[in-house]
Amino acid sequence: MESLPLYAQLINLLASVLLLLAFAMLAQRRVVTLIDLFAAQGLALACSTAIVAYATAQPHLYFSTAITLVLKVAILPWLLHRLVQRLDVKWDVEGLINVPTTMIVGLVLVIFSFNLAVPISQLANTVTRATLGIAMATVMLSFLMMITRRKAIPQVIGFLSMENGLFFAATSATYGMPMVVELGIALDVLVGMLILGVFFFQIREQFDSLDLKHMEKLKEGEAE
Amino acid sequence: MIEILAVLGFPLSGAAVLAALGHHRIAPKVNVAASLATFLAAAALTARVVSEGPLLVLDRQFFVDPFNVFLVALTAFIGFTTSLFSQPYMRIEEEHKRLSSARLRLYHSMFQLFSFTMLLALLTNNMGILWVAMEAATLTTVLLVSLYRSPASLEAAWKYFILCGVGIAQALFGTILLYFAAEKLLGAGGGALLWTELDGVKGQLGPTVLSLAFVFLLVGYGTKVGLVPLHNWLPDAHAEGPTPVSAVLSGLLLNVALYAVVRCKVLVEGALQTAFANNLMMGFGLLSVVVASLLLSRQKDIKRLFAYSSIEHMGIITFAFGMGGMVANFAGLLHMTVHSLTKSAIFFTVGHATQKTGTQVMDDIRGLITISPLVGWGLAIGSLAILGMPPFGVFASEFLVLTTAMREAPWATPFLLGALGLAFAAVFSKVQPMVFGETTARRLPMRPSMLPVFAHLGLVLMLGLWIPPFLADWYRQAARLIG
């Protein structure tokens, strides 16, 4: 078996870092660390996009790298840190998650995603096709994280990390979406985050907590 | 082309003006004016497309064919009537101190921005921009649903944001897969996401990738359509937001999301040459109809009741498009029109009824006919129309769906008939005492704004009795387009 070129190896390495970070986020209970992990994930994503851009000489991917760096490594983590400080939830820990079980479910999801990605990867002619499974796994793990968390901020970080996974899928399967679409997506994510920031304060004001377990008044069929 | 720019430009500039203007006496008037201008532009666009055929303009970024122009006209029309209804409604909310002037500024500005995102989703030719516009529509409506900032409305908005956010992320993945399949044929760059280009090569798109893409797209946009089991956000968002917002959510947003699904289905069907996409849509549609009709009888809140009824009707439409073919598509398009018109009319009357009685709990709403005859009759007639009583248009479209189902999918007919019967029993038994029951409340002096309600119901009645030839022709063209 011939060895892969250096850039492909680097991309694979970064892909595994991405997956590892997704698992780390799944197991992390502290909000502040979670934000740092999210920023690290953004950085890994930006690096891999830059390498793909260099290796394939796709100039528009440099723009996506720049967007990722600015948005996901700088602005969003900064916003989240500020929110955590202003809301004074710096030391919040998530009590309810059962780490070992979540990890096992996560492993199953990874295997599932890899299997799902096999037929598509075979069709791809990009250098990065092997990473499509990892991208899908990152999406699934972020999804799992959103389900298992009961606090507002970790849920949102799960949402953002899902977006990272999708972005990685776009670069690894197709060398990125057209520019105008990427810009639109970035704008939506940013605006969404700003709205959520306002929301956190409203929620805290109304429920005295960012714990979503208070939000179970609206139930199916409403018996009371 | 000028029409397209006008259709998109009026709501966008309306949003900017209303945000800058702040809460002012004339803000509701500006809102109505912007919506009216949008509607007139949409009418001009429609006239143009009807006389000259499909348009593909601005570097192929915008595409108008009979299928989307009909939805553009419908969206702009209901946007306009809703802005008329929201004038007195919001004034009363302000008098009751439920909303501050800063909130009203947000409301008016977001209302226009929401119209803009929906029209953009309809008019764009780019599947990526379609996604961006749908997500932007979610964001604007999250702000609208949480307008009262009460615990319940925040909870509803949060649920809406998270569920639709996750859903729409699936749709993004589906879009990426679509791009992945198309890029090989059309080359990288903007061209490979343009619907018209995709439609041209749909026979050669990779079937494995496209079937996977369709699952993600259907789940993603289906969350916004409110298909069971992805419907959880819908009743909460409808019940907790201001009533004009419930009206546009039910009447417009669900349609636009379904439009996205149908556009994807056309591509996937062409690539697969099997009934995979059709079967999925029929399955989701039927499940939504059955589950929603079972849940209808358990509702206590009037807005939740009609929200579940929206899930049921979106299920019927999805089922119709799933069956495919001329007649079913025709019925689906007709049902989209009459459901939007009737459901928004119902929400208008419900808005007046809840304001007059001060509650959304159905057990506490009694004798509307004595409190305000117009509101009472509006609710009674609207409910009969939505339940599919002849001679209203809903009857015509449901009849077409059912008869086609008997031929195409006989196994589904008993479920559909049973669900429609259940829905009738549930809604009718709840609406009857609300309208005709005994009440001690006195007759209220303020006059409701019922013109939009009766305009909508009149149109629905007309569509049940007689579909104007140009409209029928137009439906037929659209039905042919979506196969």
Image: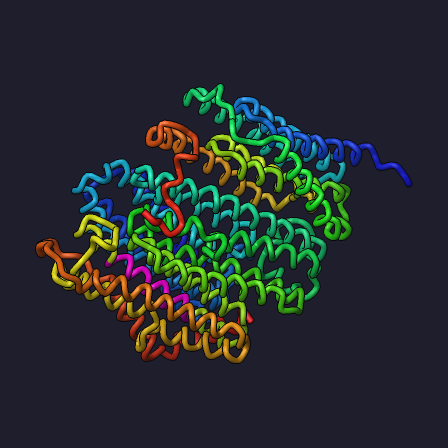
> Magenta includes B344?
yes
Residue B240, horizontal then vertical, whole percent: 32, 46
Residue B479 position in % (x across, y down): 50, 72
**Start-end of magenta stretch:** B334-349
Q: Is residue B127 left or right of residue A175?
A: left
Left or right relative to B245: residue A87: right
Please tell me which residue lies in front, A208 or A65.
A208
Q: Nearer the viewer, residue B381 or B324?
A: B381
- How many marks the image carries: the answer is 0
- Rendered residue at 48%/47% (across/down): B164
Task: Say left or right for B406 vs A3.
Answer: left
Q: Position of residue B400 (x, y in %)?
A: 44, 77
- The x and y percentages for residue B210 are 65, 58
Q: Quadrant of residue B185?
A: bottom right
Residue in front for this viewpoint, B372 or A29: A29
Residue sitting at x 52%, y 48%: B167
Q: Residue at x 57, y 63 (%)?
A: B280
Instruction: Please name the residue shown 23% across and 37% down the image.
Output: B101
Position of the C terminus of chain B, as image quadrant, is bottom right
Any part of residue B41 in sight: no
A217 magenta-colored: no
Q: Quadrant of residue A194?
A: top left
Colour mode of the rendering: rainbow
| Chief secondary structure of the magenta portion | helix
**Quadrant placement of the N terminus of chain B:** bottom left
Q: Is residue A105 above or below residue B187?
A: above
